[in-house]
Amino acid sequence: MQSLEALQREMESVNAEEDRALQQLRDRFGGMRRYCLYRRSRIIENIPGFWLTALRNHPQLSPRITGQDAEMLRYLTNLEVKELRRPRTGCKFKFFFQRNPYFRNNVIIKKYEVRFPGPVVSVSTPIIWRRGHEPQFFIDRNQNLVHSFFTWFSDHNLGEFDRIAEIIKEDLWQDPLRYYVLGEGIRRPRRRPIREPVEMPWPFGFLSG
Amino acid sequence: MQSLEALQREMESVNAEEDRALQQLRDRFGGMRRYCLYRRSRIIENIPGFWLTALRNHPQLSPRITGQDAEMLRYLTNLEVKELRRPRTGCKFKFFFQRNPYFRNNVIIKKYEVRFPGPVVSVSTPIIWRRGHEPQFFIDRNQNLVHSFFTWFSDHNLGEFDRIAEIIKEDLWQDPLRYYVLGEGIRRPRRRPIREPVEMPWPFGFLSG
């Protein structure tokens, strides 16, 4: 029985040592990744319209960006996606904007947090729209309601496992250059004009929240 | 643009290096853990009734072990819980039995496999019962149907996220000694007699599968 007890203690110390080694590894590579991302951000800030181009070239995101959205996203200077720091679990999206005619915010943040016990919750910065510039709903050719990309910030229903957040975090954020260059002639997709001819304004305004 | 491309490659190599380092760490500690478990198994094999005692002392497992189960689990000589080897994801439970009057199997295996895309599936060794020794259903004092612990092997409905598998893997398997010694007088719980006086045989036999 004593040998079993000794073995149990040995296994526990193996597990604890592994946890420590894993944490050290995560810290080391996390630091390297953060330094790369910092340098990437500094470069991207100096390429006008980088994120707008990357977003509009992304096959799954571009259908969510209306002509009006594109006008507003011209002022997007940077984007940041960060995991929440322990002990919290989740992630945070930070959209940085230049001064623009549409809303007053310099930064719009959307945050997802996994709560134990409990569901994932999302919160966001309320957008302060300048008068008459709230995004409109549209009806497309097929009579579908088209929401503004900006509805994503205030929509906390977490519908379809929040696909937009997932696509931005797992795909666009991992390699935005790949989508940016799609518009640079390397592989030019069918691009939609910034103003969509079939858009019809929806009679009700859009409330930020 | 070239500096962005270079950075992207740098980030990819950071990620690849991290994956390699993580894998090395997992291999190293996995090997240490396997060696501990091997020695633990060799000790436990020489303690008669170790697993039966540990199972019957476990507060969440003991209510699932009927008197008839305990008679059969007396012949359980060893237990193994293993993660499936890559590329598969899941785990495997191996129950080793001595020759006994109840069934012919020396080993009963239950395996859970996570399939992508698709759900978790479980499969198990069919139990070859000796004539007249199939476990019976019982009705307890509160008129609830009590299943044999052995139904767990053949029940692949994955009800309530297969609590039995989860408890064995995450708790009992991690520290079986803790539950074994509960019966050794260190902290003696209310133990149920091996034959439960309120058990009433259910008219239908139990089909293994």
Image (tube, coloured by chain):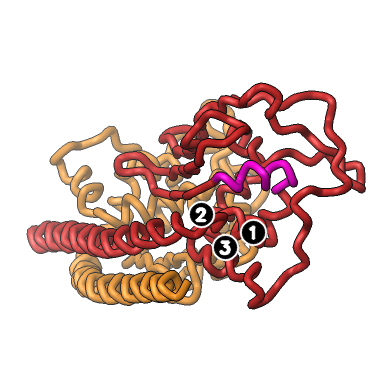
Chain colours: A red, B orange
Which stretch did the figure color magenta?
A65-75
Using the rendered view, name the quadrant where residue B209 is placed.
bottom right
First along the sequence among labels 3 and 1: 3
Residue assigned mark 2:
A169
Question: Quick check: is A70 in the magenta stretch?
Answer: yes
Frontmost of labels 3 and 1 is 3
Which is more toward the observer, A144 or B58? A144
The answer to whether B157 is drawn above or below residue A102 in the figure is below
Amino acid beneath label 3: Ser
Q: Are marks 3 and 1 in contact (CB under 8 Å)?
A: no
Q: For the residues marked 1 and 2, what is the alpha-carbon distance in whole angstroms?
A: 49 Å
Chain to which mark 1 belongs: B
Q: What is the chain identity of the residue bearing mark 3?
A: B
Q: Residue at x 64, y 53 (%)?
A: B205
Task: Determine the residue positioned at 75% across, 25% down.
Answer: A205
Front residue (pair B129, B172): B172
Q: CA distance from mark 2 to mark 3?
A: 33 Å
Identify the residue position indicated by label 1 in the image: B207
Please give the label number shown on residue B122.
Answer: 3
